[in-house]
C-alpha cells in the first residue's frame, strides 16, 4: 500500500522553507502548517527536521530572525528572507524546475525507447 506522505529529496526542505518565508515573516510552527496545508498533507515536517533546518539557514545568513509575539500572545522567532536567501531561492527554484522537467522527460519514455 502506498503512503500518502512523501519523503523529501535531500535539500528540498531548505528550498520549501525559503519559499514559504519569502511570502512574509513567519514563525517556525506556521511554516510547518503552511507546507502541510499547501501540499494537502503530503509534506509534513516534524519539528526535529524543521528547527535544525531553520537554524542552518539562519547560520548561512539566508534567513534573519527576531523574537516577536504571535497572534495568540506567545513569543516566537519570526524568520524573514535575506537578500542572500532570495538569491538562493531563485537559483534553487531554477535548478529544481530544470531537474523536475528532466525527470519528467525520462519518466515519459515509452518502454523500449523515447516517445
Image (cartoon, rainbow, N blue to C red):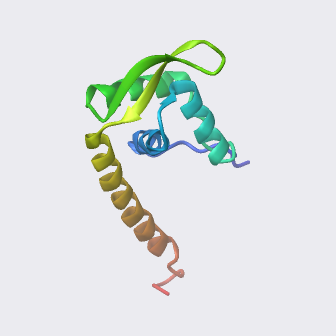
Residue, x 54% and y 23% (percent of image)? 47
Residue, x 31% and y 41% (percent of image)? 85
Give the percent coordinates (x, y) of residue 84: 25, 41
Identify the residue at the far right of this view.
1
Give the percent coordinates (x, y) of residue 66: 40, 20
Give the percent coordinates (x, y) of residue 6: 59, 45
Out of 114 and 64, give the one closest to the viewer.
64
Compared with residue 78, is residue 10 higher up or lower down, i.e. above or below? below
Query: Residue 93 falls in which quadrant of the image?
Result: bottom left
Identify the residue at the far bottom of this view.
115
Counting labels gives 0
Out of 71 and 109, give the one closest to the viewer.
71
Compared with residue 114, is residue 68 higher up or lower down, i.e. above or below? above
Residue, x 48% and y 39% (percent of image)? 24
Give the percent coordinates (x, y) of residue 114: 45, 85
109 to the left or right of 88: right
Residue, x 45% and y 46% (percent of image)? 19
Amino acid at each position: 500500500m502506498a503512503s500518502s506522505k512523501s519523503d523529501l529529496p535531500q535539500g528540498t526542505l531548505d528550498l520549501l522553507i525559503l519559499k514559504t518565508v519569502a511570502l512574509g515573516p513567519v514563525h517556525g510552527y506556521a511554516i510547518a502548517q503552511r507546507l502541510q496545508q499547501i501540499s494537502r498533507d503530503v509534506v509534513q515536517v516534524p519539528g526535529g527536521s524543521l528547527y535544525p533546518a531553520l537554524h542552518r539557514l539562519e547560520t548561512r545568513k539566508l534567513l534573519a530572525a527576531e523574537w516577536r509575539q504571535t497572534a495568540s500572545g506567545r513569543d516566537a522567532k519570526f524568520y524573514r528572507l535575506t537578500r542572500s536567501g532570495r538569491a538562493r531561492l531563485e537559483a534553487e527554484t531554477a535548478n529544481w524546475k530544470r531537474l523536475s522537467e528532466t525527470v519528467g522527460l525520462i519518466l515519459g519514455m515509452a518502454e523500449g525507447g523515447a516517445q
